[in-house]
Image: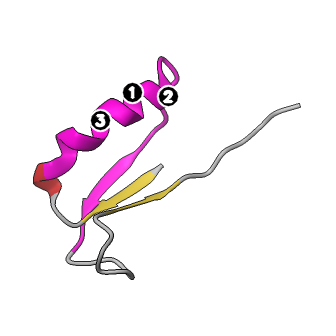
Amino acid sequence: MLVFMTDITERAAINPARIAYFGEHKPASTLVEVSGLVDPRMKVEIEAVAYIGD
């Protein structure tokens, strides 16, 4: 999982949603602060890759 944030000081605001969604199965992730996203109204962009095995 790759998380892009325009204001890294707001990291604590996304952690509860992340914990609620993933529970005990936390993915490897990277958090990067960026100067802006494609839509200036956005504060966070998340890119995730999932694998569903047989």
Quadrant where the C terminus lies?
Answer: top right
**What span is in magenta?**
10-34
Q: Where residue 27 is drawn, which disc sits there?
A: none
Whole-angstrom CA distance, mark 1 to mark 2, is 5 Å
Determine whether label 1 and label 2 are within 8 Å by CB.
yes
Q: Is residue 11 left or right of residue 44?
A: left
Q: Residue furthest left?
A: 9
Q: Is residue 4 above or below residue 54?
A: below
What element does badge 2 sit on? helix
Determine whether label 1 and label 3 are within 8 Å by CB.
yes
Residue 33 place in picture, x, y as percent? 22, 64
- Residue at 41 percent across and 44 percent down: it is 29
Q: Is residue 11 left or right of residue 30?
A: left
- Residue at 48 percent across and 49 percent down: it is 1
Determine whether label 2 and label 3 are within 8 Å by CB.
no
Q: Where residue 22 is drawn, which disc sits there?
A: 2
Graded by Cα atoms within 10 Å as few (under 14), some (14 to 19) or many (20 or more), the crowding at tag 3 reads few
- Residue at 40 percent across and 35 percent down: it is 18
Residue picked out by circle 1: 19
Q: Is residue 13 left or right of residue 24?
A: left
- Residue at 33 percent across and 77 percent down: it is 37
Whole-angstrom CA distance, mark 1 to mark 3, is 6 Å
